[in-house]
Image: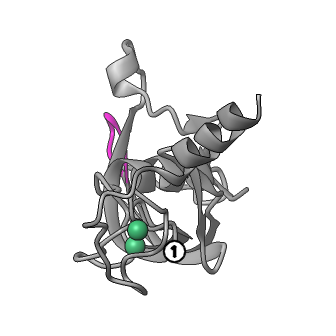
Amino acid sequence: MTSFDLRRLRLRSGEEHRDEVEVELPPLEFGGQRYVSVPSTVAAELTVNRATTGTAFRLRLHARLHGPCYRCLGDAVVDLPIDVREYQATNPDSEELRSPYLEDDRLDLSAWARDSVALALPDQIVCREDCAGLCPECGRNLNDEPHAHEDERGDPRWSALEGLKDRL
Ligand SMILES: [Zn+2]
Ligand SMILES: [Zn+2]
């Protein structure tokens, strides 16, 4: 996991530091499925602004996640431009003035990036906007084999049960 040590910056009030950082992006669980960043480490830009009252952080990166399509379970890719900010007051007297990603002057970039990516995810991750999904009748992929079940021959599972009943 990637963290950034702020102590080595020695920023004074009014100063800004900008850095190119490589952030390891851990896999995400979403809708019971697993999505992984490819590559697992992404280039990000971190900006640190020091003021007398506190420190402002900005993280920018472009995440590309790979995982199953919500509809057909085929491969899906989602691109997410991330641009997020955090603030830590010099003397925080409430949780709101404290960044959850900052501890002992170390900024947890991986956790921050992962949470930001999770918040930026669409409602459904699909392989393409018009993905037809899986056939609810037979489970075959409707993108590969567009078809409909018009003749009501009945559910094959029921006919199997019927056959079983005859033998009892
Ligand atoms: Zn799909
Ligand atoms: Zn079908």
Position of 3 relative to 16 (above/below): above
Residue 58 image offset from top left, x and y in percent: 36, 58
Image point (53%, 53%), residue name: 156
Element type at mark 1: loop
Left or right of residue 46, residue 35 in this image: right
Residue 49 image offset from top left, x and y in percent: 36, 56
Asked where in the image residue 143 lies, by quadrant, the reply is bottom left
Asked where in the image residue 164 lies, by quadrant, the reply is top right
Image point (56%, 38%), residue name: 102
Position of 117 relative to 133 (above/below): above
Indicate yes or no: mark 1 CB to ligand 1 under 8 Å: yes
Asked where in the image residue 79 lies, by quadrant, the reply is bottom left
Question: What is the span of residues highlighted in magenta in the rendered image?
Answer: 50-57
Residue 148 image offset from top left, x and y in percent: 28, 72
* Label 1 crowd (10 A; few <14 / some 14-19 / many >=20): some
Q: Quadrant of ligand 2?
A: bottom left
